[in-house]
Amino acid sequence: MDSFALKGRVAVVTGAASGIGQAIAKTLLELGVIVGALDRNTDGIPDGCCTLLADVRDHDAVTHAVTQFAEKHGRIDILVNNAGVSFVGTIEQGSEQDWMRVLDINLLGQMRVMRAALPFLRQSDAASVISMSSCTATNGIPERALYSASKGAVHSMTLAMATDLLAENIRVNCISPATVDTPFMTELANRATDPVAKRRTFNERQPTGKMVDPAELGFAVAYLASPLSGSTTGTTLVLDGGMGTLRIPKYPGASENGKSST
């Protein structure tokens, strides 16, 4: 764990009270990072984090929370822009209010936090920004028109920011996971008529046959956050179980991993 060279670094993680953000915050804590956990809820924020109470839709609240935390520690070394919401539906579904809400959180929320953190990232000797994108940004996933649009924008914004901040030694990357095994996915499965079958479909989206473990995202963030990964910028780190690149044949006699059982 010490090999990441993150002990004593200062991080802000958004959406840290649950799911992916919570797992990331826990991993960074284990690596000795000082973690400011920004969320609109305090329940679920890991013990040991500094709680930053703010909704990413509220510019003033975000700026106040990030500034107070950063001024206390003198800088921000790591920003993990993770807070986001999902939406299921085709282009015909969802009101304009639904579309504005998802974009406000998933895209503009990242912009607000980035703007608040940037003056303090400039005080770091090895600043790293990690944005949470999604496999939906680059794969045609059914009934994800709105969510895909928001994450595609995050992906593009990451590349633009990486270019703009390159000369200031601020690295910007994003992570693109497939379906992550969070309590939210369990909740979705439990809403179905057959929760077991629904969970199976979530697992089978990935060629590996399983959802992504949230802890994997924690270690992915640790790599991108580490000053030892100084040549990694403008990059998307993909954790999708092979969804975007592998095609597993489905035919009689094939085993679960796609190889012939004969």
Image: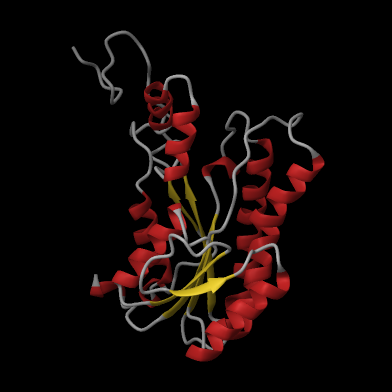
- Location of the N terminus (image quadrant): bottom left
Q: Residue at x 45, y 49 (%)?
A: 238
Closer to the camera in the image, 36 or 74: 36
Q: Residue at x 58, y 85 (%)?
A: 68
Say whether residue 130 is left or right of residue 107. Answer: left
Asked which colour scheme the image uses, the reply is: secondary structure
The quadrant where residue 31 appears? bottom left
Which residue is the extreme one toward the right?
Answer: 96
In the image, residue 129 lies at what x, y percent?
A: 53, 70
Picture layout, residue 232 above or below residue 262: below
Say whether residue 88 is left or right of residue 203. Answer: right
Picture layout, residue 75 above or below residue 151: below
Image label count: 0
In the image, residue 245 lies at what x, y percent?
A: 44, 37
- Location of the C terminus (image quadrant): top left
The quadrant where residue 94 appears? top right
